[in-house]
Amino acid sequence: MNPYRLYLVTDDRQPTDTLQKVVAEAVAGGVTLVQVREKHGDVRAFIERAEAVKDALRGTGVPLIINDRVDVALAVDADGVHLGQTDLPAALARRLLGPDRLLGLSVETEQQLFESESLPVDYLGLSAIFATPTKTDLKKHWGLNGLKRALSVSSRPIVAIGGINADNLRQVAGTGVHGVALVSAICAASCPRSAARSLRRMMK
C-alpha cells in the first residue's frame, strides 16, 4: 500500500483534544499518513501532542511522522520524520533513526531535487505546488508542470504540498503524483471525516 496517498499535516494552532479528534476522524475518512507539525519550539508540548496523535492512530495502521524533530520522533517511537532543508542533515537523521523508519525531505528547488537523489530518504515533499498562506518564505511555486517535471526526474515517491484543496486536487492527482499533503482542507473542515472521504474519492 502507498502510505503517502492522502497525507495529513496537523494544524499546530488547534488545541490537543481537538487535534486528536480531527486526526481520528480524518483517518476514518481515508487519510493514509499523519505528520505532526509544531512550530512553537516547546519540545515537551510537542511530545505531548505527538503522543495524543499516536493514541488516535493506535490500531489503524496509519504511520505517524514527526516534522523536523528526530528527538521527538524517538521519544514517542514514531514511524518516521520529515525534514526541512535547514533541519538535521538527512544522513545524520538516518543514522539516528535506523534503517526502518520513514524519512522524508522537503524540496523547494531544482537543485535540492537533484541533490536529494544521493540522500538516504524515502520520499520527497515537493513544496509548494501553489501559493499558500501557511508558507510565506517559499523559494518558488512548482505548479502542475513543475510537479510533472519533478516526477520525471526523481527516483523517490513525491508528495505534493502547498495550496492544494478540493478545487485543484483532481488536477494534482492527474499528474501521477504519489500523494498529496493537506492541512486546512481537512483540519479546518466542519467534518474532517467527510472532507477526507471526499478528497480520497477525487484522487481516483
Image (spheres, grey):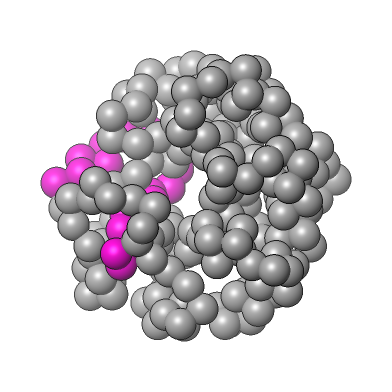
**Percent from the top left, x then y, of residue 138?**
23, 50
From the viewer's perspective, tell me whether residue 67 is left or right of residue 83: right
Q: Quadrant of residue 30?
A: bottom right
> What residue sits 64% from the left and 67% below the top?
189
- Counting from the top left corner in percent of width and height, residue 34 is at 62, 48
Q: Residue furthest left?
A: 111
| Res. 61 visible in picture | no
Q: Residue at x 69, y 46 (%)?
A: 19
Specify the farthest residue to the right: 59
Question: Which residue: 75% across, 35% down?
Answer: 52
Where residue 69 sits in the image (x, y, percent)?
A: 49, 25
Identify the residue at horizontal 77%, vertical 59% (top origin). 25
Magenta stretch: give its range: 111-131
87 displayed left or right of 40: left
On screen, 69 above or below 188?
above
Residue 49 lies in the magenta stretch? no
* Left or right: 12, with 94 as reference point: right
Q: Quadrant of residue 149?
A: bottom left
Q: Quadrant of the C terminus?
A: bottom right
